[in-house]
């Protein structure tokens, strides 16, 4: 909410139903000479020239009607100066359609001498701004309480259709495990394959919007070419295709088609849609995180990284993907040297600590696209998509050196000599085209590193 009101061009104040200031933007503070912490939590009447009685009449009327109003009144600055303002207000609704707060915008009219048309344009623009701010707050409230992805998508579609009224709405998400595009909603409903090319559904990176993370607006299809990934042909109007992004990574996209030409030409309309998509992206990511947390069985309780079961499932999928894209795929299998001796001499607590330290070091060395898992006992494995043998060997050597620098602290303050690991590296399809042969090749390289003195990196 703070981010939304800070984007306003007027002095904006958000007030609770009991007339207490909930939020203000920096323009309000500069306008009145207050700091934010001085205003938030104070009664709204503090800054109104006509005081509490006037506020009660205005606020009661607003909460009953819920409509936009304009009134000439005055604000009081911190030093007692009276500032004439044109005050506009609107009610903000929650998802239950009850008014949960009010939003006021004030325009300083001191010394203003404008013609009526200019004033009308300014008022119309501010009315629109207030409506959009109210809509964004409603949109955020509507989607942020949802806990399941399918219900969230339905709520997103309701809110988007309510404001933008698209003739066609498409919501698609990326299945991160299968690396494919899922289309849970097309309204009006048609088969996804009749709207989006099959190749894009299988490989989302073929969509320019998903690959670049940049939105695409077509204002008039008669003069601008449509995206190559669309099978559906438009005869008139235009569309907006906007990615759902989290941390610079696409997790889906939303497409809105309007038969009205030049609808998406207006920059303010584009900006409003992009803000909505930012809110939707965060909500979708949050819901997915909650869903992932329910699958704790795929993680190792001690180290917090993936377990052997998850590794086996992902390796099959990554091999299939690498084969389809004709890309290399490497795996690294690492084993802590002399781990049994460490356990026997210092106990299992120290052994567990060593496993945790090594997992932390390895996790800090890999990319977001890499998959780190505890393979079993003191062994770790990393799946590295689109990585050849040479690059995998370089990464393995970096990990080996980082692990070698670890110093474990004893409970009595004494240090334990540096840990070391031996590493085997194998690459698809050079060292195997099936998961078993692939892993066996990396295991053989690991055994070779052990035989040759440990604390080294080997490949078949």
Image (cartoon, helix red, strand yellow):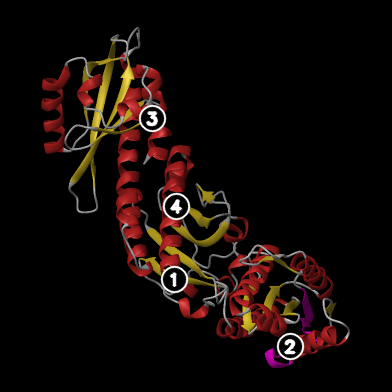
Query: Comparing marks 4 and 1, which lies closer to the viewer?
Result: 1
Q: Which mark is residue 25?
A: 3
Picture coordinates of residue 5, whole percent (x, y) = 38, 35
Mark 4 or mark 1, which has the lower sequence index?
Answer: 4
- The residue that label 1 is drawn on is 293
Measured Cα–Cα span from mark 2 to mark 4: 42 Å
Mark 2 or mark 1, which has the lower sequence index?
Answer: 1
Q: Which mark is residue 438?
A: 2
Measured Cα–Cα span from mark 3 to mark 2: 59 Å
Query: Comparing marks 2 and 4, which lies closer to the viewer?
Result: 2
Query: Comparing marks 3 and 1, which lies closer to the viewer?
Result: 1
Q: How crowded is mark 3: few (under 14 residues within 10 Å), some or many (20 or more)?
A: many
- Front residue of 198/337: it is 337
- Is residue 56 part of the magenta span, yes or no? no
Mark 2 or mark 4, which has the lower sequence index?
Answer: 4
Picture coordinates of residue 168, whole percent (x, y) = 39, 60
- The residue that label 4 is drawn on is 277
Query: Comparing marks 2 and 1, which lies closer to the viewer?
Result: 1
Residue, x 37% and y 28% (percent of image)? 36
Query: Comparing marks 4 and 3, which lies closer to the viewer?
Result: 3
Residue, x 48% and y 41% (percent of image)? 265
User: Looking at the rendering, in which quadrant would you find the C terminus?
Assistant: bottom right
């Amino acid at each position: 909410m703070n981010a939304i009101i800070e984007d306003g061009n007027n002095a904006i104040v958000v007030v609770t139903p009991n007339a207490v200031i909930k939020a203000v933007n920096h323009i309000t503070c500069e306008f009145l000479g207050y700091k934010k912490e001085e205003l938030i939590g104070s009664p709204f009447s503090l800054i109104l020239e006509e005081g509490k009685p006037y506020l009660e009449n205005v606020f009661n009327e607003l909460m009953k009607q819920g409509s936009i109003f304009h009134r000439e009144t005055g604000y009081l600055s911190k030093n007692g100066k009276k500032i004439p303002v044109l005050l506009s207000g609107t009610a903000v609704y929650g998802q239950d359609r009850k008014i949960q707060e009010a939003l006021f915008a004030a325009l300083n009219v001191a010394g203003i001498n404008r013609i009526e048309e200019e004033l009308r344009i300014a008022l119309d623009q501010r009315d629109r701004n207030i409506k959009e701010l109210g809509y964004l707050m409603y949109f955020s409230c509507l989607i942020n309480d949802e806990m399941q992805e399918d219900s969230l998508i339905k709520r997103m579609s309701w809110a988007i259709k309510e404001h933008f009224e698209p003739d066609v709405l498409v919501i698609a998400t990326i299945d991160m495990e299968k690396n494919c595009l899922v289309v849970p909603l097309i309204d009006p409903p048609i088969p996804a394959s009749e709207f989006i090319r099959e190749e894009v559904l299988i490989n989302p990176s073929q969509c320019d919007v998903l690959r670049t993370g940049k939105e695409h607006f077509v204002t008039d299809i008669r003069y601008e070419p449509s995206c190559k990934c669309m099978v559906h042909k438009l005869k008139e109007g235009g569309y907006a295709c906007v990615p759902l992004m989290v941390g610079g990574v696409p997790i889906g996209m939303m497409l809105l088609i309007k038969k009205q030409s030049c609808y998406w030409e207006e920059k303010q309309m584009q900006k409003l849609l992009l803000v909505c998509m930012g809110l939707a992206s965060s909500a979708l990511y949050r819901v997915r995180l909650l869903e992932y947390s329910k699958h704790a069985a795929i993680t190792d309780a001690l180290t917090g990284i993936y377990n052997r079961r998850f590794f086996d499932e992902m390796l099959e999928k990554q091999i299939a993907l690498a084969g389809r894209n004709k890309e290399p795929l490497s795996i690294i299998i690492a084993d802590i040297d002399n781990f049994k001796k460490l356990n026997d001499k210092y106990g299992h607590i120290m052994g567990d600590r060593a496993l945790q330290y090594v997992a932390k070091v390895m996790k800090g060395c890999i990319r977001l696209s890499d998959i780190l898992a505890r393979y079993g006992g003191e062994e770790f494995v990393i799946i590295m998509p689109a990585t050849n043998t040479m690059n995998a060997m370089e990464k393995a050597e970096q990990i080996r050196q980082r692990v070698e620098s670890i110093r474990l602290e004893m409970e009595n303050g004494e240090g334990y000599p540096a840990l070391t690991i031996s590493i085997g590296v194998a690459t698809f399809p050079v060292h195997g085209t099936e998961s078993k042969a692939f892993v066996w090749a990396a295991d053989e390289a690991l055994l070779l590193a052990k035989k040759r003195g440990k604390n080294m990196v080997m490949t078949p």
